[in-house]
Image: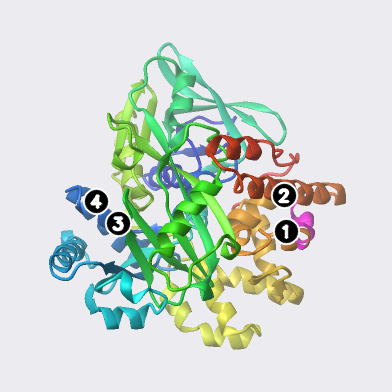
Amino acid sequence: MAVEEFDVVVVGGGIVGAGVALDAVTRGLRVALVEARDFASGTSSRSSKLIHGGLRYLEQYNFDLVREALTERGLLLQRIAPHLVRPVPFLFPMTHHVWERAYVGAGVALYDALSFSMGATRGVPGHRHLTRKQAHRVAPSLKRSSFTGAVQYWDAQVDDARYVMMVLRTAAGYGAQIASRTQCVGFLREGERVTGVRVRDLESGDKVEVRARQVVNATGVWTDDIQDLVGGRGQIHVRASKGIHLVVPRDRIHSASGIILRTEKSVLFVIPWGRHWIIGTTDTTWTLDKDHPAASKADIDYLLDHVNEVLTVPLTHDDVEGVYAGLRPLLSGESDETSKLSREHVVAHPVPGLVMIAGGKYTTYRVMAKDAVDAVVHGLDGRIASSCTDRITLVGGTGYQAVWNSRYRLAASSGLHVARIEHLLRRYGTLIDDLLALVAERPDLGRPLAGAEDYLRAEIVYAAAHEGARHLNDILSRRTRISIETWDRGLGAAEETAELVAPVLGWTAEQARREVEYYRIGVEAERASQSSEDDQEADALLRGAPEIVPTTGHEAAFS
C-alpha cells in the first residue's frame, strides 16, 4: 500500500467499509482498505444476524427505510448472496382478539407489499394468520395463556461475520488491497485537503503512509474517534447503543419458527440458528470501552425475564451456551433514548478529501456504500461508472443453485455425509470445491473438529489459508461461531485449532501455546463480566483481558 497512490482508502473493515471497498473497486477505482483489528470484529459480527426490513419501523411511519431494506433483502436472497442469506419464519403472537389482529395484520400486509416495490420479487413466502391452536402447533413451547393467536411472516438471516469476509474476498478478487490489524493513526494533509492516512501495522509495529485521492471513514461507532484525528468540528456524531444476545440449545425451546415479542421498549427476537436459538436484543446507551462491549448479569436477566413470560418451561442461566454484545452506531439526535435515535445513514464531507458514512443498518449496507462512493466520485476527476453492486454476486454465489442440487453426488464422491456437504455449501457456496480438495489431499481434515463437531478440520485450515484469519480468536469467534455455540466457549477446540493453523501461519510451538492461553484468559474475563451487576463492573473485568499475542512477518491471506 505504501508504494502507490489509490483513488480511495477505506478506514474500517466492518460491513459498511467492506461494501464501500467492493462498490469502489467495481467502478474501476484503485482501492485499499485498512482495519485496526480483525475484519468484522466490532458491530458487524455481533448483530441479530437478520436481513430484514425492520417491522417495528412501520410504527414509526418510516416507510422509506423499510422499503429500502426489503428491496435489499430481495437482492441479497436472490442475486447477491443466495449461498449466505436464507429465509427464516417468525411468529408474532397476539394478546388481544380483534383490534390487534387487524392492526398487526395490516402492518405485516404492508410489510409484504413494500417488498414488491420497484418490481422486485420479495424472495420469501407471504404472511399468514394463525389461530391460537394453529400457532401452538407451530410453537408448542409457547404458553397457551400468553397469546390469543398469531401472524407468521418471513424475513432472512445471515452469518454476519462470514458475510463481511465474503464481501472483502469479492473486493480483493476485483483488485482491492485489504489489510487487517492495521490501525489508522492519523491523516496525511496538503493544506486543508486530506491526501491519505498514516497507519500502524499492529503485528510488526511498522508505520506506513498510504496516499489516496479520497479517504472514506466507515468505522461505525468509532466514527467520532477517527473524526477527531482530522481536527475541526465534526459533521456527524454517533452514539453507541449496546445490544446483547443469548445463545441457547435448540431443544430448550420447541418451535418450528422464530418468534418475535413486543417489549416495553422495542421487540425481542427468538431466532433459529442451526442447533441453537439466538435471543435478543437489548437497547441501552454504552459510553465505555468500544472495543469490548460487555454484557452484564442485568442484561442477561432482562432477556431471560422477557422470553420466560411466554415459555411453558422457563430458561435459566444454566441454559445459556453463549452470550455476545455489540454496539449499534446510531446518529445522535435530541432524544436521550438510543431506541429512538435514527437508523438511517448520513454521508458527510467534513474536510476536502474525506468522506464519512455513519448510521444505517446491516441490511442496507450496500446502499450506504453506494452513497459513500457517489460522494467520493464528486471529488475525483474524470468519468467514473455508477454503482453496479446490485448486479455483482459475491464469491461463492455464482451457480450456487446448481451445485446445491448436486449435493448428493458431491457427498458420494467426497465420502462426506450429505449433511456435511449442505453445511459447507451454506458457508462457502461454490467455493466448496476448495474445501473438498483439502479433504482429498489430507483425509484427516474431513474429520469433525474435537470440541466443536459441527465444523470440519478443513474449515479451520481454510480460515487461515484463504480467509485472512491471523489469530485463534479470529477463527473461533468469526470464521466459525464456535465461541458462542459451545458450552465451554470454544476452549475444548482451542488446542486442536492452534495445531491445525500453526503450519499455515508460521507459528512456533510457543506461539501456538500462547494463543491458546490468551484465548482462555479472554473467555474467563468474558464469563466474569457476565456475572457482574452493571456495565461499569462488566467493562472493568473485560478490560483486564490481554490483547491477542502479536506475530510478525505473515500477511493476512485472501484468495
Q: Residue 212 at x, y = what percent?
A: 47, 28
The residue under the point 50% across, 29% down is 5
* Mark 3, residue position: 72
Disc 3 residue type (three-letter): Glu
Q: Are marks 1 and 2 in contact (CB under 8 Å)?
A: yes
Q: Residue 57 — which label? A: 4
* Mark 2, residue position: 519
In the displayed structure, would residue 393 be above or below residue 300? below
Residue range in magenta is: 496-506
**Front residue of this view, candidates 67 and 106:** 106
Q: Residue 404 at x, y = what percent?
A: 46, 79
Query: Which callout, 1 or 3, points to the residue nearer the camera?
Result: 1
Q: Secondary structure at mark 4?
A: helix
* Mark 1, residue position: 491
| Number of residues whose C-alpha sits closer than 10 Å to that of mark 4, classed few (under 14), some (14–19) or many (20 or more) | some
Q: Image quadrant for the N terminus?
A: top right
Q: Quadrant of residue 491?
A: bottom right
Disc 1 to disc 2, C-alpha distance: 8 Å
Q: Residue furthest top?
A: 191
